[in-house]
Image (spheres, grey):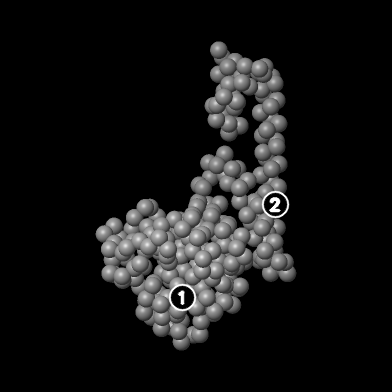
Amino acid sequence: MQQAERRLSILWTMGLRYSDMSVMLINILSEGEFELLGKILVVLLSAFTLTLFILLLVLLHLLRKEKIIHSNLLLYLIHLLYGPLTIVSDLFGVEPDSIDRIFIKLNNNLAFDEFKATDPCERVILLPQCMRDASCPAKLSPVDGFHCISCGRCQIGSIKHLCDGLNMKVFIVPGGSFAKRILKSYRPRAVVGVACFSELYEGLLNTGMLKIPAVGIPLIRDGCVGTAVDEAMLLDVILAGIDLTGKAKAYEEFRCHYMRS
């Protein structure tokens, strides 16, 4: 009985959950073999984590030094590292959003110049339906999402008003699959996506497959209803590449400080 409990303890320290596989291992391995298996897995996990960390440092170095390297290659490396790093962070109890936050920042840095070079009228803004007020009167269209009537109960109306003046299309979408359908239908030259971290990463993955430069803006207040976005950060992206007069007017209207666009 004590040996079985000890083996379970070793399994748990290796990050494995009690499952059919763990029961099978307890029954067929001796305590010494179990300890050896644990040591091997710990060494492999450590080597794997170190390799990922080194690759990430190299990636950051290339970005900081502005080395000439194709952005698509860097984006591919980012997406390649995302899954393994998420698994490792989960094993070590790291907050899941931390990995998403890092990769979204890297993606935005790589995509920003190409995004900025596009004509504003060829950009699309994707806003999540959870930004709406709980009593939002907007109706849902199966073709292009919710139709905002600018009732003033949330941030969406003012964002839409600004984008309408710039001839940018704004879509309020109920989910990731809906957003993907809009991208395939409208084929924009560039995309601004607003969402929670997990949805944002999935959306950036979709735009990458469609070869559309996209910048992701995370929500500052998440949840299912009444979420919010940092308007200054969003404006910084929406107004990228627009003349200074247009920017000044927009920032004054939103009472936000100019950032980098």
Q: Position of residue 97 (x, y in %)?
A: 50, 51
Q: Position of residue 19 (x, y in %)?
A: 55, 26
Residue 163: in sight, yes or no?
Answer: yes
Helix, strand or loop under label 1: loop
Instruction: Residue 171: name its quadrant.
Output: bottom left
- 119 displayed left or right of 66: left
Which residue: 66% across, 17% down? 28
Mark 1: few/some/many CA within 10 Å (<14, 14-19, 20+): some
Which residue: 67% across, 40% down? 46
Residue 168 circle label: 1
What amino acid is at disc 2? Ile
Quadrant where the N terminus sits is top right
- Mark 2 against mark 1, which lies toward the viewer? 1
Residue 61: in sight, yes or no?
Answer: no
Residue 54 circle label: 2
Looking at the picture, does residue 48 appear above or below residue 10? below
Instruction: Residue 227: name its quadrant.
Output: bottom left
- 146 displayed left or right of 86: left
Residue closest to the far bottom: 245
Instruction: Residue 11: name its quadrant.
Output: top right
Q: Position of residue 191 (x, y in %)?
A: 52, 68
- 214 displayed left or right of 248: right
Q: Earlier in the sequence, mark 2 or mark 1?
A: 2
* 73 and 104: which is toward the camera: 73
* 116 and 92: which is toward the camera: 116
Q: Position of residue 60 (x, y in %)?
A: 66, 60
Helix, strand or loop under label 2: helix
Looking at the picture, does residue 5 appear above or below residue 134? above
What amino acid is at disc 1? Met
- 192 displayed left or right of 208: left
* 125 and 6: which is toward the camera: 125
Residue 145 circle label: none
